[in-house]
Structures are given as structure tokens and as C-alpha cells.
Amino acid sequence: MQLSVGDKVVCPGRGVGQITRLERLDLVEGFERYYVIEMPDKGLTLRVPVRTTEALGIRPIMSRAELACVLDTLRGMSRQLSEDYKKRQDWVRERLEIGGPVRIAKIVRDLTWHERRARLTKVDTDLLARGRDSLSAEIASVTDTKIAEARQMIDDALTAS
């Protein structure tokens, strides 16, 4: 996957950022190229080796077509999650780390449904919040809106399910 300066990207565990430049640093092993990713909402600047972006799960933000799929997923039928909280939480964590926007939408939808029919643990609640925050930031970036508006889009889609 080739990324370019100006591309908006998602960094798992960090959020949405934009590649502002490409740096070449002289290290002991030789020269290494780095993407410089600015995340102004979080006050972060990341330097990520170009060769490790895929392994780290860094990806371009979703397209408008993917946004439509995300909203359809949120409106869709939820699947029942494991009643065993440890299995459920491991499954959710794994998908949050490696998941694209549709996977994250499935997590948000399924945990929201689980919350309505049963009680969520503190960890489940935190994972749901993490998924919603991640999805909200990406939707806001794609639609060029505020995060509050993106959260409302998520809520509206979940209500329609």
C-alpha cells in the first residue's frame, strides 16, 4: 500500500491523522523513510517507518462508498455475542486493533445490541466507547463534519436497526 503526503489515515489505537511529510533519517542500519502523521485533535505527531505501515494496521480513511456500507452495517441485524465475557472481550479487542471501518461498525452494533438485552461489564462499556470514538472520528473526517454530528449519524443508524 502506497500512501502519500496529504492522505488522511487511521492509526489503530491512535485515531485519524494526516500524513504531512515524508522524512528520511540516517540510522545505524542505514537510511530509513518515515511518514510524519499529524493528529491535531490529540496533539500528536507520529513518525512511522514506511516499511511497517501495513504491519501496524495503518490504512487510508474509508471512502464515501465504505461510509454507506458502515451505515448499512449499523442499521443491520446484530449477531449475538458470547455470554462468556472473557471470550467476548478478547474477540472485540482483536477486531478493534485490526479492523477496518465495517468491522468496527459491527462491533459497535453488536455491543450496543448486547447492552440493550443484557448488562455490559465495565470493560465492554470501555470497548464500545473506543469503537464509537474511532468510528466517529473517521466518519467526521470523511464527511468533513464535527465529531458530534458523526456520533449522531451513528446513533440514527443504530436506532433504525
Image: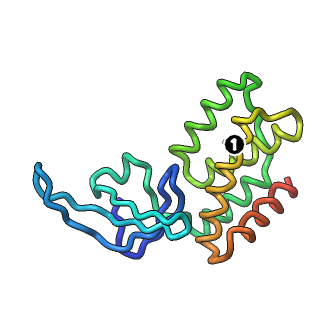
Residue 71 screen position, x and y as percent: 72, 60
Q: Residue furthest front?
A: 43
Q: Amino acid at mark 1?
A: Asp
Q: Quick one: 160 or 83, which is closer to the camera?
A: 83
User: Quick one: 109 or 93, which is closer to the camera?
Assistant: 93
- Residue 127 vs residue 112: left or right? left
The image quadrant of residue 81 is: top right
Name the residue at 31% across, 50% down. 52
Image coordinates for residue 19, horizontal then vertical, percent: 39, 70
Residue shown at the point (44%, 50%) measured from the top left: 57
Relative vertical location of residue 138 with respect to residue 58 in this rendering, above or below: below
Q: Which residue, given by chain and number where applicable, does mark 1 sit on?
A: 126
Write down the quadrant of residue 18 in the picture.
bottom left
Q: Which quarter shows the N terminus?
A: bottom left
Residue 146 in percent (x, y) is at: 68, 74
How many circles with numbers are drawn on the protein?
Answer: 1
The colour scheme used here is rainbow
Task: Give the answer, above or below, for where 111 lies relative to 144.
Answer: above
Residue in front for this viewpoint, 131 or 113: 131
Q: Is 86 drawn above or below residue 94 in the view shown?
A: above
